[in-house]
């Protein structure tokens, strides 16, 4: 299953954990949850498992791939109970990130969830 989150708030892992107030982190996580659920409106629970999740982050000034992990984690958390039963080690075996350059208007995160 593939889906795209268009124009999410782009936040690096470094910025998220280096001095950002917990309440601000919670607000961003809530935005990601809402945007993920909106992108998945017609999706059903995936059968089987375990799963692998690939995140392709398109940004006008791209982050290092490893600096995209907090955005991926917020999306992964929003998938629980929506298309995957859980995000524990028994259900999610592999998570990977790729980072690309695009125009500011085309910023997005493409997510691919498939059987491991």
Image (cartoon, rainbow, N blue to C red):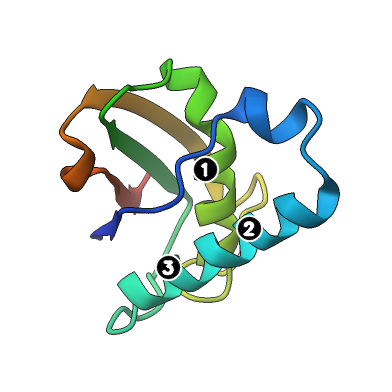
Q: Position of residue 78 (x, y in %)?
A: 55, 65
- Res. 12 image quadrant: top right
Mark 2 or mark 3: name the one nearer the start of the chain: 2
Give me the disc on residue 71.
Answer: 1
Mark 1 or mark 2: name the one nearer the start of the chain: 2
Distance of label 1 from label 2 (alpha carbons): 8 Å
Residue at (31, 24) in percent of width and height: 99
> CB of mark 1 within 8 Å of CB of mark 3?
no
Query: Is any part of residue 83 visible from this angle?
Result: no
Residue at (81, 30) in percent of width and height: 19
Q: Quadrant of the N terminus?
A: bottom left
Residue beneath disc 3 = 35
Give me the disc on residue 29.
Answer: 2
Q: Position of residue 40 (x, y in %)?
A: 34, 74
| Viewer-nearest residue: 32 or 112 | 32
- SS at badge 1: helix
| Horizontal side of residue 7 vs 51, given as left or right | left
| 39, above or below 108, in the image | below
| Viewer-nearest residue: 58 or 95 | 58
Mark 1 or mark 3: name the one nearer the start of the chain: 3
| Viewer-nearest residue: 17 or 115 | 17
Residue at (81, 56) in percent of width and height: 23
Query: Is any part of residue 103 visible from this angle?
Result: yes
Q: Position of residue 114 (x, y in %)?
A: 31, 51
Q: Quadrant of the C terminus?
A: top left
- SS at badge 3: helix
């Amino acid at each position: 299953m593939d889906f795209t989150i268009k124009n999410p708030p782009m936040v690096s892992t470094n910025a998220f954990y280096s001095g950002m107030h917990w309440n601000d982190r919670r607000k961003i996580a809530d935005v990601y949850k809402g945007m993920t659920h909106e992108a998945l409106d017609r999706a059903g629970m995936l059968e089987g498992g375990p799963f692998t999740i690939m995140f392709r982050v398109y940004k006008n000034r791209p982050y290092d791939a490893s600096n995209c992990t907090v955005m991926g984690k917020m999306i992964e958390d929003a998938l629980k109970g929506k298309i995957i039963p859980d995000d524990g080690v028994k259900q999610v075996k592999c998570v990977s990130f790729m980072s690309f350059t695009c125009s500011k208007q085309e910023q997005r995160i493409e997510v691919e969830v498939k059987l491991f």
